[in-house]
């Protein structure tokens, strides 16, 4: 049974720049640079027939390439931080692509995504990192400059059912344009 999700791949030069943010935070489990991506829609563990339906639905999407801006570093989890992320600007084309995927996947019986879409690249998952340590980490990296790339396609990824996922495999690619 595959575990699937859709996403945008991060160009190698940007991934290397983001990879330079690794280190200096106790309790962080840093994500491998080759696994950086922006998740559009988590699908989950599904059977092969449903996976074929997912692929057929995603093939219907027709959108133009668009610019994605990675704006800033941040964290998720508030007082109990759980991740260090590079946040992407929720620009209209990105949000519309995610919303269209949500609609198409619901039509074939995939349960709705309960979380609000917040585009980001996860850099580290946190265990036992204090909110103060995370704040110190982020303030010491205030030199991060926003970066842009053009999304030319989105992909259907598969992952292992392990903590932290990865390695991720591109099962199908859907060109934009």
Image (cartoon, rainbow, N blue to C red):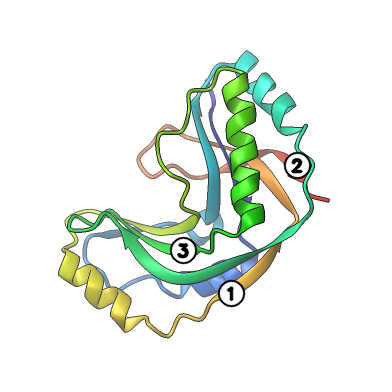
Badge 2 element: strand
For label 2, the crowd category at 10 Å Cα-Cα, with few meaning under 14, some 14 to 19 and many 20 or more, is some
Residue at point 51%, 45% (across, down)? 167
**Number of marks in the rendered image:** 3
Mark sitting earlier along the chain (1/3): 3
Pinpoint residue 49: horizontal percent, then vertical percent. Answer: 64, 14
Circles 1 and 3: CB distance less than 8 Å? no
Task: Kindly report the distance in space between the C-alpha atoms of the residues bearing marks 1 and 3.
Answer: 11 Å
Residue at point 55%, 57% (across, down)? 34
User: Any mark on residue 174, and which?
Assistant: 2
Residue 131 placement: quadrant: bottom left
Pinpoint residue 117: horizontal percent, then vertical percent. Answer: 47, 47
Badge 1 element: strand
Spot the residue most to the right. Answer: 177
User: Any mark on residue 87, and which?
Assistant: 3
Residue 61 placement: quadrant: top right
């Amino acid at each position: 049974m595959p575990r699937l999700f859709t996403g945008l791949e991060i160009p190698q030069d940007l991934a290397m720049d983001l990879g330079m943010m690794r280190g200096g935070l106790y309790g962080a489990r840093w994500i491998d640079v080759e696994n950086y991506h922006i998740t559009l829609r988590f699908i989950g563990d599904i059977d092969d027939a449903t996976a074929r339906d997912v692929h057929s639905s995603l093939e219907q999407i027709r959108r133009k390439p668009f610019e994605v801006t990675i704006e800033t570093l941040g964290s998720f989890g508030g007082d109990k931080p759980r991740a260090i992320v590079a946040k992407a600007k929720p620009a209209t084309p990105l949000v519309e692509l995610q919303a269209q995927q949500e609609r198409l996947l619901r039509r074939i019986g995939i349960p709705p995504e309960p979380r609000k879409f917040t585009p980001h690249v996860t850099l580290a998952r946190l265990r036992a990192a204090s909110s103060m340590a995370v704040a110190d980490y982020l303030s010491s990296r205030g030199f991060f400059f926003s970066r842009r790339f053009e999304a030319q396609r989105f992909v259907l990824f598969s992952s292992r059912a392990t903590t932290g996922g990865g390695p991720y495999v591109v099962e199908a690619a859907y060109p934009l344009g």
